[in-house]
Image (spheres, rainbow, N blue to C red):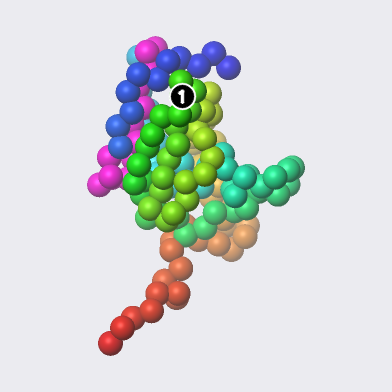
């Protein structure tokens, strides 16, 4: 892939989105949820073919920190504690260019699994 140079990254915590600007003039927005459920980590992708783990309950996930790793990737720390997997420039650009396809596939996988984007509120304990 001929990936343009990423020149600006902005985290918008309130809207849970990340804006990415490229030297080609292209600008994209990726949701924190999309970045989280499509994390390039082994925790999400698995360690081999067919071992991916469907991420559920991530509708409200946000990003705590984005840090560059050398001149090739970003490390993203999410507020659910997930912080493994490096988002290379090629992977980020691919997510930007194909986000609708990836999102539709993710929603279809959730539907087939009978799972939800919403956090499981049944595990929340209320103190009286």
Q: Nearer the viewer, residue 110 or 120?
A: 120
Neighbor class of circle 1 (other Cα within 10 Å; few <14, some 14-19, many 20+) is: few
Name the residue located 47 percent from the left edge and 50 percent from the top edge: 82
Numbered marks: total = 1
Disc 1: which residue:
70
Residue lying furthest front = 70
| Helix, strand or loop status at disc 1 | loop
Image quarter of the N terminus = top right
Q: Residue at x 33, y 81 (%)?
A: 126
In the rendered image, the vertical position of residue 35 relative to residue 25, given as above or below: below
Q: Residue furthest bottom?
A: 128
- Kindly give the residue lying farthest to the left in the view shown: 14
Question: Residue 79 or 12: which is nearer the viewer?
Answer: 79
Q: Nearer the viewer, residue 89 or 24?
A: 89
Does residue 115 appear in this view? Answer: yes
Viewer-closest of 122 and 70: 70
- Kindly tell me whether residue 92 is visible in this rendering: no
Query: Which percent across, then down, holds residue 63?
Result: 36, 45
Residue 36, x across and y down, in percent: 47, 46
Q: Residue 118 lies in what quarter of the image?
A: bottom left
Q: Give the magenta part as a residue range.
A: 12-24
- Asked if residue 126 lies left or right of residue 118, the reply is left
Q: Residue at horizontal 34%, vertical 46%?
A: 64
């Amino acid at each position: 892939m001929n990936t343009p140079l990423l020149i600006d990254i902005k985290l918008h915590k309130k809207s849970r989105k990340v804006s990415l600007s490229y030297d080609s003039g292209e600008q994209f927005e990726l949701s924190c949820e999309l970045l989280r459920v499509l994390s390039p980590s082994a925790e999400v992708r698995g360690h081999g073919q067919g071992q991916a783990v469907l991420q559920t309950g991530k509708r409200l996930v946000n990003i705590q920190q984005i840090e560059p790793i050398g001149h090739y990737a970003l490390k993203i720390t999410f507020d659910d504690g997930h912080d493994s997997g490096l988002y290379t420039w090629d992977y980020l650009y691919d997510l930007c260019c194909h986000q609708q396809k990836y999102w539709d596939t993710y929603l279809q996988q959730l539907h087939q699994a009978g799972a939800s984007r919403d956090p499981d509120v049944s595990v929340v304990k209320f103190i009286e």
